Image (cartoon, rainbow, N blue to C red):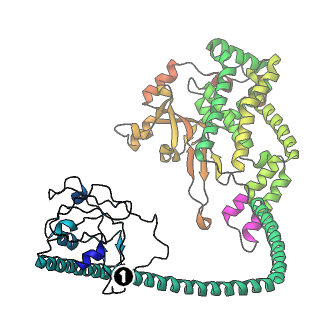
Amino acid sequence: MNVLKQLDPNFPRERDGMTPRSPENKPLETKVDSAPPKNMKPDYNLPTKNQVFIYTEPASPSIYSDSGTMGLTKSDLVASESGAQNRGPRQALPRGLVAQRYANQPSHHRHQSNSSTSSPVFVDCDLIDLGGDVPSPSNKSSDNGVGTRTNVRVTEVDHVKDIHRQRELEELRQKLKVTTARAEIAEEKAVNAEQRVVEVKATKISSFNEAQKDTGSLTSRLEKLEKENSTLKEQLRDAQSHIFSLQPYRKELTPEEVGREYDDLIEGITDWVAKFMSPFLDDHTAGVNAILSIARRRPTDAIRLKQIIQACPDLAHASMFPETDEDLAIAIILRFLNENIFQRILYGTISNYVEALGFVEGALQTQVEPKRDIFAIRTWTAEAYNAILSSHPFKGCRAKKTEELTKELAGIFKLFCKKDHVAQFHEEFEKNCVVPAMRLYEKIQVSTNHFYFDINPYIMWGSQEGQFQTSPEFMTDLRNLDCRNILQNRKAFNLDKIDPEPSQKELHYHLLNVCTIAPALYMRQIGRKDVIRPPQSVRKQQMLVAWGTQEKRDMFQHDSERTLLSHLYHAQNDRERQEAGGWATFRWSS
């Protein structure tokens, strides 16, 4: 009871025959500071004998609600204005409820007091109806029981507090260990960083000092290198310029390109021949009379054409076959161009330059050490020819030679030109024959590949006058010739397409060589180690042949009319008869 009196000074005194008064239901006024003092620290000192700890719990909905779980009604203890608490009966809590609540003590307490001093204000907690628990004065044993229960409760509170303190201490120890470990790691990192900073500073300072020492030498060296770099750049540009300038002039011409230009040349000549001979060939009888009349009036022109035909046995042989006038004219023009352009070095106009070029070529091949290979000599020759052909003095020589060749070539066919069309006649020969041939020749001269023309008529004069003899090489080279059969309107004759292929005996009796129209075009290339490769045929030699039996050939000649050139070739005028030593009447040669 003394303890209870210490807890509450207004505890009611024992009176005989009096019942405790019920307190008024007023809210409890509690004076609580808005914030705890800053220097507040937990006090872990053991309590004295006169100190009593009052443990207060936070409000619980199960206890402080209007209707608790135990079916109890919340009672508020309200202090009077004078500080004394009203007396009266209190609703007693069930036995063991306080012990159960302290057994489940929370980890944190909002209100805790370690002082035994009484206060007129009570904290908000579950109160025990002290007035209701006071026994009558006659019952002393009940008083002793209440004191014992109070002591047990205080002991339980101390035990719970000790457990709470131990938990807090253990948590603080763990946090202290973690914090200490982190602090040690951070300190170690700081020490390492300081050492690294010192090392870097020392390195940088030493490097900076060395750089300052070498600044002067590096500056001079930089200036020297810049000058050297500028000099080397200039030398490199000079070397590049020299390399390009030392490269020889080379123009690789493919066989297809040269072959196309050769075809264009033949086609242009064919068109021009058909144009100037068509007035005489459209009406055969009138044409023969006209050409013979012109030949009698201008025997010199007639003799010149006849001499050219006489110089070529195959052309004389072809004049005996019908429909060969245009073929003979084309053959005469191509042979003239081949002889005066393709087979001569620079048209034979600057012989002194040609001799100088030949001398240098021989010296490069035989006398220079180290000796030059054939490809290098050919490259140098092509470059030299290109320089000569591009020079201004040679342009005059070319123009002069063009005029000479045109006049000479047009003079061969002067019988077919009217007197009032001579200038135009010459112009057409120049445009369609001479100039294209000279352009093709100059083009192949500046090529590293060697292009050349070759012609083989395979017909020669026999031992007797007017007799022809065929070369045996004709049958051997037959597959390398472009033959046209006049018996079948100039259809191509190809042994590979004849089925079955004729034997050599059949070819000997049934195949007749008429004449050669166009020269062959070949190309030779230079291989490694001065190896000259075999000739490559760019265009085959064009031939006229008569493929058929003897009866077919005789019938073709008998049924067709003789050519104009045949009449002209076999006719003799007064001048020819005088040169022959007689005044015989005009006759046709058989």
Q: Where is mark 1, residue-wise? A: 174
Q: Any magenta on residue 110? A: no
Label 1 neighbour load within 10 Å: few <14, some 14-19, many 20+: few
If the image is split into quadrants, where does the C terminus sit? Answer: top right
Look at 17% across and 80% down and name the residue there.
148
- Quarter that holds the N terminus: bottom left
Q: Is residue 29 above or below residue 55?
A: above
Judge from the rendering whether residue 372 lies leftward or rightward of residue 158; answer left or right. right
- Judging depth in this view, the residue of 83 and 137 nearest the camera is 137
Tell me if residue 366 is in the magenta stretch. yes
In the rendered image, which quarter is residue 132 located in?
Answer: bottom left
Query: Where does the image place residue 537, in percent across and percent down from the top left?
Result: 55, 47
**Looking at the image, residue 348 lies above or below residue 285:** below
Q: Report the magenta stretch's main SS.
A: helix
The kind of residue tagged 1 is: Gln
In the image, what residue occupies the spot 76% across and 86% down?
209
